[in-house]
């Protein structure tokens, strides 16, 4: 019996350690640990509620836009604005969020995940005239393998020419990602940490110039998604098709949905959205979501046991770094006591099972190509495919939102900050279901809690000993070469983890935190 420890896992966001116990070549047990402590919530307490929108964006550099939307929906609801955001405000929020998600999905596939499947060393022998490949070749020859290492050896399956073509796409994706970030900045002011999304709507006004400037970038991105990103995911699926059966996980999915199609419904759980809200079980039944059954366990997290099982509205966190048996700074969110995976897979399956024609028109031919049923989506490759589908659906819907914008009409609704109130913001971030929850007293933040996508996915065991989604996806995996456990990192990266988000906010009250200082 051997133990594989990968610490840190590279090419993800934040600090993640994975431990796998391997017996006769199969993972018998796995532990996912968030090893970085963070302390945002203490900064929020006592502040003007509107600061939440600015500060929570700083939880993360890759998904600040999702935090800006979640915190703003949370403040909209606390300020009684939920059903009265002007259409221009709603549409511009969709366009800002969508730009960030397109950039994020392209980043994930090419710059974080693809090098587990693409052998970059093939470029070292390249003899052709392609300037991009020659610049990568020079890079390798300088002996600075830079972002391409560390890597595992032994299971790269593409023919040499395809590997080189994919390395070219890796470089092209850097340019594409920049275009999407620029789109985000056109209406959001800047990226990361946009300035435009605020309670009541947005601060930016749509003009013909900005719409045109956004549109030509979007068109280029749509071509890239159709002609490069989606085909590359399908090509990987063909060559690595065993990964439709590897990394299956808990087979329960949860989506909050995203992209408002109708701003008039104040209740976030009833709002019409492009991506649908709901839970999906292993038999592919879709159910309406009930936020009241979400709670966070901490038995195996470095927090005091007195706070375990709390609902987000009553969340409190007392750190205890020396707690016996604990192994992560990540808590364990559970839905009705069960383990649920969140992410593009969840939102695409919820939308697919809701009968959405657009999503079906992309997913069905992809599954038909592999003569596979929708159940294979519960897998390493299913996560990558769902992410690419998510990216395409957003990009293909954006022209409609651009056309619906009405220059000259309002983007923003006035409001008063109430003396006392509470609010909830739910949105599917790039990595999945993101919830922000606020309590306001005397016009100030009395409590603010976030339950974040990677908190769900990277969670350790819960109070009942049930392993988290990543842990379940790892257990049972056959490792061909324990010195090169590429199967583990392929599974981990298919979730697109962000530990910066997963260990986000805590309330250090009465806890022990001798190694850490909050300045
Ligand atoms: Ni830091 Fe995030 C996204 C949020 S993640 S990346 O997407 O919310 O778990
Ligand atoms: Mg939290």
Image: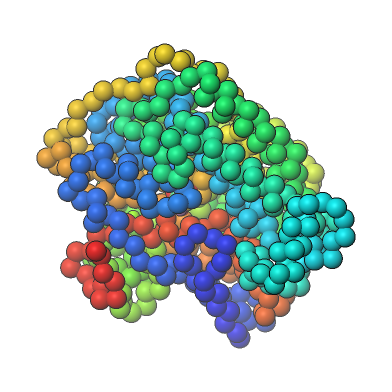
401 or 481: nearer the viewer: 401
Horizontal side, residue 346 vs residue 135: left or right: left
In this rendering, the answer to whether 418 lies above or below 48 is above
Q: Which residue is located at x 42 percent, y 22 percent?
A: 205
Q: How is the image coloured?
A: rainbow
Task: Report which quarter residue 295 is drawn in.
Answer: bottom left
Q: Quadrant of the C terminus?
A: bottom left
Residue situated furthest left in the rendering: 442
Residue situated furthest bottom in the rendering: 1
291 or 494: nearer the viewer: 494
Q: Quadrant of the N terminus?
A: bottom right
213 or 3: nearer the viewer: 213
Q: Which residue is located at x 80 percent, y 66 percent?
A: 124
**Residue 297 locus on image (x, y percent):** 34, 62
Residue situated furthest right in the rendering: 127
**Residue 21 locus on image (x, y percent):** 57, 79
In this rendering, the answer to whether 453 lies above or below 397 is below
Horizontal side, residue 224 vs residue 516: left or right: right
Q: Which residue is located at x 32 percent, y 27 percent?
A: 200
**Residue 247 locus on image (x, y percent):** 63, 61
Horizontal side, residue 185 vs residue 328: left or right: right
Horizontal side, residue 396 vs residue 47: left or right: right
In this rendering, the answer to whether 89 lies above or below 182 is above
349 or 293: nearer the viewer: 349
Can residue 42 be seen in the rendering of this structure? yes
Task: Report which quarter residue 424 is drawn in.
Answer: top left
In this rendering, the answer to whether 145 lies above or below 24 is above
**Residue 358 locus on image (x, y percent):** 64, 30
Task: Report which quarter residue 183 is drawn in.
Answer: top right
């Amino acid at each position: 019996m051997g133990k594989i420890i990968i610490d840190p896992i590279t090419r993800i966001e934040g600090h993640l350690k994975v431990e796998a116990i391997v017996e006769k070549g199969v993972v018998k047990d796995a532990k996912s640990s968030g090893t970085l402590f963070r302390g945002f919530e203490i900064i929020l307490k006592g502040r003007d509620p509107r600061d939440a929108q600015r500060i929570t964006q700083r939880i993360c550099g890759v998904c600040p836009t999702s935090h800006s939307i979640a915190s703003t929906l949370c403040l909209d609801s606390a300020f009684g604005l939920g059903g009265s955001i002007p259409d221009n405000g709603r549409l511009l929020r969709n366009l800002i969020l969508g730009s960030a998600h397109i950039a994020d999905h392209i980043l994930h596939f090419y710059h974080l995940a693809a090098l587990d499947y693409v052998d970059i060393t093939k470029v070292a022998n390249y003899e052709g005239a392609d300037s991009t490949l020659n610049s990568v070749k020079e890079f390798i020859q300088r002996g600075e393998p830079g972002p391409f290492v560390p890597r595992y050896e032994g299971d790269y399956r593409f023919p040499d020419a395809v590997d080189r073509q994919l390395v070219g796409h890796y470089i092209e994706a850097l340019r594409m990602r920049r275009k999407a970030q620029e789109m985000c900045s056109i209406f959001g002011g800047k990226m990361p940490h946009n300035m435009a999304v605020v309670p009541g709507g947005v601060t930016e006004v749509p003009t013909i110039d900005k719409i045109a400037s956004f549109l030509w970038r979007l068109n280029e991105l749509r071509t890239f998604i159709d002609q490069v990103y989606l085909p590359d995911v399908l090509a990987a699926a063909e060559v690595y098709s065993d990964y439709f059966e590897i990394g299956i996980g808990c087979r329960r999915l949860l989506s909050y949905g995203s992209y408002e199609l109708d701003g008039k419904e104040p209740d976030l759980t009833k709002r019409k959205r492009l991506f649908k809200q709901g839970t999906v079980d292993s038999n592919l039944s879709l159910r309406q979501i009930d936020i009241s059954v979400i709670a966070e366990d901490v038995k195996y997290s470095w927090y005091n046991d007195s706070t375990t099982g709390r609902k987000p509205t009553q969340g409190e966190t007392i750190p205890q770094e020396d707690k016996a048996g604990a192994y992560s700074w990540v808590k364990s969110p559970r839905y009705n006591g069960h383990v649920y995976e969140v992410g593009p897979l969840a939102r695409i399956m919820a939308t697919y099972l809701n009968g959405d024609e657009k999503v079906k028109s992309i997913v069905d031919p992809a599954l038909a190509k592999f003569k596979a049923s929708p159940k294979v989506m519960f897998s390493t490759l299913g996560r990558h495919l769902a992410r690419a589908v998510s990216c395409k659906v957003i990009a293909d819907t954006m022209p409609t939102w651009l056309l619906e914008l009405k220059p000259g009409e309002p983007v923003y609704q006035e409001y008063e900050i109430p003396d006392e109130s509470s609010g909830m913001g739910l949105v599917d971030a790039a990595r999945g279901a993101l919830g922000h929850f606020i309590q306001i007293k005397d016009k100030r933040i009395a409590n603010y809690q976030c339950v974040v996508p990677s908190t769900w996915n990277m969670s350790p065991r819960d109070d009942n000993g049930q392993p988290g989604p990543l842990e379940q996806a790892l257990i049972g995996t056959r490792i061909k070469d324990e010195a090169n456990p590429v199967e583990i990192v392929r599974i981990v990266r298919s979730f697109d983890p962000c530990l910066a988000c997963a260990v986000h906010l805590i309330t250090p009250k009465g806890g022990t935190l001798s190694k850490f200082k909050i300045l």
